[in-house]
Image (spheres, helix red, strand yellow):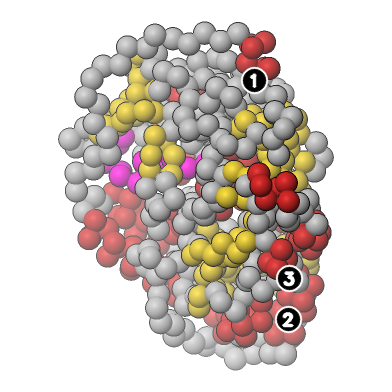
Amino acid sequence: MKFFIGIIVTLIIVLGIVISKSSLASKLISQKNQQVYVKAIYSMPVSYDPIKMNDGASLIFSELVYEGLLRFTEDYGVQAGLAELWSASDDGTILTFKINPKAIFHNGDAVTANDVKVSLTRNVSQESVVYKYYDVINGAKDYHAGKAVAVDGLKVVDSNTIEIHLEKAFPPLLYVLAGATAKILPAKLVAKKDFFKKPIGTGPFAVQRISENKIYLTRFAVYHSKLPQISGMELVMMDQKDAMEEATLGKIHDLSSWPMNGQEAVFKSGKDISSIVADTWVIGLNARLKPFDNLEVRKLFQQSFDTQKFRDTFYPDAKVAFGYVPPSFPGHRTTKLETVSKIEKPPRELITINIPAELDKSSEMAQFITDQFNAKGWNVKVVMTKWDKMMAEYSAKTLQSFLVAMIVDYPDPEFLLNNFESTNPDNFSGLNDPGVDSLIVQSRSTQDRIKRQSIQLELAERIDGLALSINLFHSRAHYWVSKCVEGFRPNLLAVAYTDYRNVYFDMDCLRRGAK
């Protein structure tokens, strides 16, 4: 299938932008008469470096402060980011991007093609946790392996034009370039030791300061695209119970970071914005560790848990999850895959399941899960763990089992199913299955859409059959925002991609003192 997103019809002559840094700094100050938007988050970002991001709080920060060549629309599409024009060669192996000449960093420096080259080079470095998303770029594999000092496929044409040469056509790369890990950072500053203590991006909001539990952002007054309507944002870390109490008092404007079912009391004093979400909530199993290194044990563990009762108890309007892949994607199951374990009696060794402590009713969930398994003869201990600690252990692959939401970061199942590729550093399950690896490679190299979807269906069924997760539900999200908030529209991909440029306050509502 020929893949064409944009067409460059003329050569753009860059005139240049000169902005004094003192003038720019004054424009970053929030206007006194405007309300700052307060958004509660369940943890501080695990990382402020896009190439190391693998958690929701980090991705939220990334979308606000940084910008990539492209951005997501609200319905799985892509739109202009730093690139105002882009095109693909007839064979799909060369992508050309023309940078918007108005695009500048928060310190006033113009964005150049070299900034793009340096930033995307970092994405395929050895320290990148998202390397697999970019390894189709020519020379990426050699650079990642330390066999080359540069990435051959990243070619600067002129100061505002860059080409990305691919080993083979890979249409989903456009989605990757619109995602939260493909952000462009200032080439001359990013290598500095303290850069990520107060990072500089090109996004609609700039960092004022970062404290232990709060991030202060201000509207970037000379942002190159649609200017945010709110003067600034505060991202405040707190657990869900405290956040709901603060929201009821009118001190929080946004609780969209948490899964909620719309029945919480806080919705009496705010808006319920409901939306489907491309996710699957799972209890993930680490096949590196006993007893989950045994397929039959995993199957029995999976069969021992009443997912319907869990869903009815905690998320009654969520959609049943028969498999790992969310609705609307190739590989999504609409019926249960019957897998019967060859063993009947659980092993007696202790199994630890970590769940996020910040979840509302986390203690009730912990008791529910414990009771479910122990009633079937398992020796299960559920540990409520702070999110940052849990994510650190997740990344280190030391968690035996854990409750998380697996979110489709990009609108293609490729980026969810490749979590099970043996060479993927983000392979939470520890799976090393030649059949799975082979199907992933086939999917990645197939351009024909119908054939590719057929491969993905086979891949998803094989993964589901390996019982690497207890699939709990697909979210029907209920996002709480203040009654005075307008313009909040969820993104179908994930809450991290909510476009806060569109959000604003009803000032009459604020003056009336509504919460």
Say whether disc 1 or disc 2 marks the residue closer to the N-terminus.
1
Q: Nearer the viewer, residue 112 or 373?
A: 112
Whole-percent x, y for residue 192 in the image? 66, 20
Residue 295 visible to the viewer: no
Residue at screen point 52% across, 8% down? 18
Give the magenta-colored segment's residue range: 166-180
Q: Residue at x 62, y 47 (%)?
A: 506
| Residue at point 66%, 81% (across, down) | 313
Q: CA distance from mark 1 to mark 2?
A: 52 Å
- Label 1 is placed on what type of residue? Lys
For residue 265, which numbered disc appears in the image? Answer: 3
Secondary structure beneath dot 1 equals: helix
Question: Is 10 drawn above or below residue 34 in the view shown?
Answer: above
Q: Which residue is mark 2?
A: 368
Q: Which mark is residue 27?
A: 1
Q: Where residue 203 sits in the image (x, y, percent)?
A: 55, 31
